Image: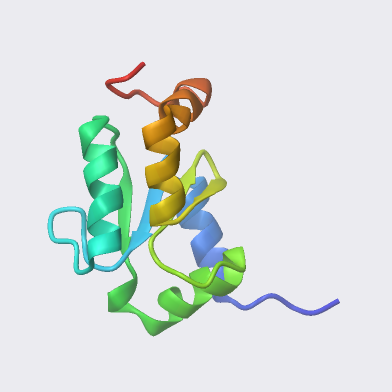
Amino acid sequence: MTQEPAIFESLRSIIDGNDVVLFMKGTKTQPMCGFSGAVVQVLNHLGVEFKDVNVLESTEIREGIKAFTDWPTIPQLYVKQEFIGGCDIVREMFNAGELQQLLKDKGIKNKAA
């Protein structure tokens, strides 16, 4: 059994401690990339409260979250400890109404509910 990186404990704590978490480049008030900004826009449009984690502040977090999910890109959205995906997936789910349904099913307040 391989030992998981120490950063995983910190990441798990953030994910477990918040209903909706977005690991992103920049912050919710100042996204630093278009993909992160697009996911922030979707969440804001739905009126979803979320925790933003700026991966640009720490190489350990930036590389750690990629290894944690085995997903190579940022942003990464979690809802109730479940990894949802990145920008394209979030956008597709939103456009299909699936993100709104997922949020409702998980008990997350949003304007579409």
Vertical order, 76 against 96 (above or below): below
Would residue 18 be seen by someone viewing this image from the given angle? no
Vertical order, 61 against 96 (above or below): below
The residue most toward the left is: 30
Would residue 73 be seen by someone viewing this image from the given angle? yes
The residue positioned 56% from the left and 67% from the top of the image is 71
The x, y position of residue 100, in whole percent, is: 41, 27
The residue positioned 42% from the left and 27% from the top of the image is 97
Q: Quadrant of the C terminus?
A: top left
The x, y position of residue 96, in whole percent, is: 43, 31
The x, y position of residue 70, in whole percent, is: 61, 68
Question: Which of the colour schemes (rainbow, by chain, secondary structure, one colour) is used?
Answer: rainbow
Tell which of 89 and 60 is nearer to you.
89
The residue positioned 13% from the left and 60% from the top of the image is 30
The x, y position of residue 77, in whole percent, is: 43, 51
The residue positioned 32% from the left and 49% from the top of the image is 51
Q: Quadrant of the N terminus?
A: bottom right
